[in-house]
Amino acid sequence: MYRLIIGDNNLIMSGLIYKNIKYDIIYLDPPYGMHKINDVIYKDNLNEKNWEQFMRTRLKKTKNLLKKDGILFISINDVNFFTLLRLCENIFKNYNIKKLKWKKFLYTKRKIPYVNPDYEFVLVVSKNELKLIENINDDLTFSYDKSLIHKLGISKYFSYPKPSELFFNLIKFYFNKKTLKILDAFAGSGSSIFGFEQAKINGLIENYEIDFIQKNEIMKNKYKNSIDTLKNTLDIFEKEFKNETGYFSKEFRRIYK
Ligand SMILES: C[S@@+](CC[C@H](N)C(=O)[O-])C[C@H]1O[C@@H](n2cnc3c(N)ncnc32)[C@H](O)[C@@H]1O
């Protein structure tokens, strides 16, 4: 089951804290702070200082929303990797912080496989020491083209949705729980749900619930705004996996202002 909460995640996270809701997984995939080299369809225009402040505020709230054995995953590229790492080390003082490095495995138009040379990273933050894996020296590749989000056409109208394999593997590496309550606080195309569903289909988990947060913003694609884009993805998800039900809660923002 999923729930879409529309609005700025800073405000909404305060509401969730107020309601004392806690998550097993929190996934943050913020705009990477690439204001100068910007080829994405959503806004990514904060300069370095403002980006850091933007992340600091949200990371502090995230800390209050994690279960004791919960894990926070944050996606980032090499440009702001160290800024983010420093922020996490300051905010999550007695936590374990691990680094995953991965590349996209793709195919050319002529179906020749290749690996995108650009690395992406996931910072993994948790109080729980035992299970945390780090792979900063090994090459991890996640297939993008074989990913459900690509097969179902989602990459046509959202720039760089994360491959479903990424989420599937995060669960495989870090969890042996049967049910997961998940917060994806920068939903974007909502790609994470496809990876969690794959984890369920493959028996890694029995069930999961996702709260998506997405703010409404003008986008440079055919849907023109971020919420219609996301709803379209979730419609595709529901068609593909008919047993799932979603509900939309626009009132949340008003209730917890
Ligand atoms: C990097 S994208 C997420 C991509 C997503 N993980 C995927 O694979 O499709 C960042 C998203 O966060 C949204 N966003 C940016 N600032 C936000 C905020 N303050 N609150 C909620 N959503 C925000 C943007 O509109 C954009 O869709």
Image (cartoon, rainbow, N blue to C red):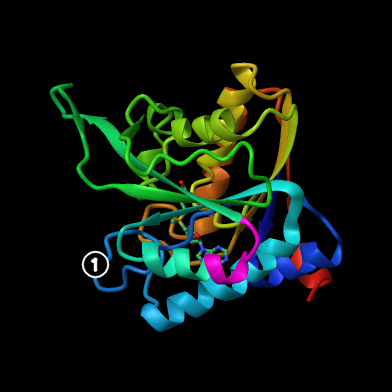
Viewed as shown, does residue 185 lie left or right of 107?
right
Viewed as shown, does residue 104 lie left or right of 28?
left
Reply above or below: 135 against 28: above
The residue at 64%/44% (across/down) is 129
Q: Position of residue 31 (x, y in %)?
A: 43, 63
**Quick check: can you spot residue 250?**
no
The residue at 51%/70% (across/down) is 87
**Which quadrant of the figure has residue 218?**
bottom left
Pick out the residue farthest to the top.
202
* Identity, as a three-letter code, of the amino acid under mark 1: Ile
**Quick check: can you spot residue 74?**
yes
The residue at 37%/75% (across/down) is 45
Viewed as shown, does residue 211 lie left or right of 215?
right
Question: Magenta segment: does it hold 51?
Answer: no
**Circle 1 residues within 10 Å: few <14, some 14–19, many ≥20:** few
Note whether ligand 1 is within 8 Å of mark 1. Answer: no
Q: Position of residue 37 (x, y in %)?
A: 24, 67
Q: List the residue tagged with mark 1.
A: 37
Secondary structure found at label 1: loop
Q: Position of residue 127 (x, y in %)?
A: 68, 52
- Range drawn in magenta: 89-95
Q: Quadrant of the C terminus?
A: bottom right
Q: Quadrant of the N terminus?
A: top right
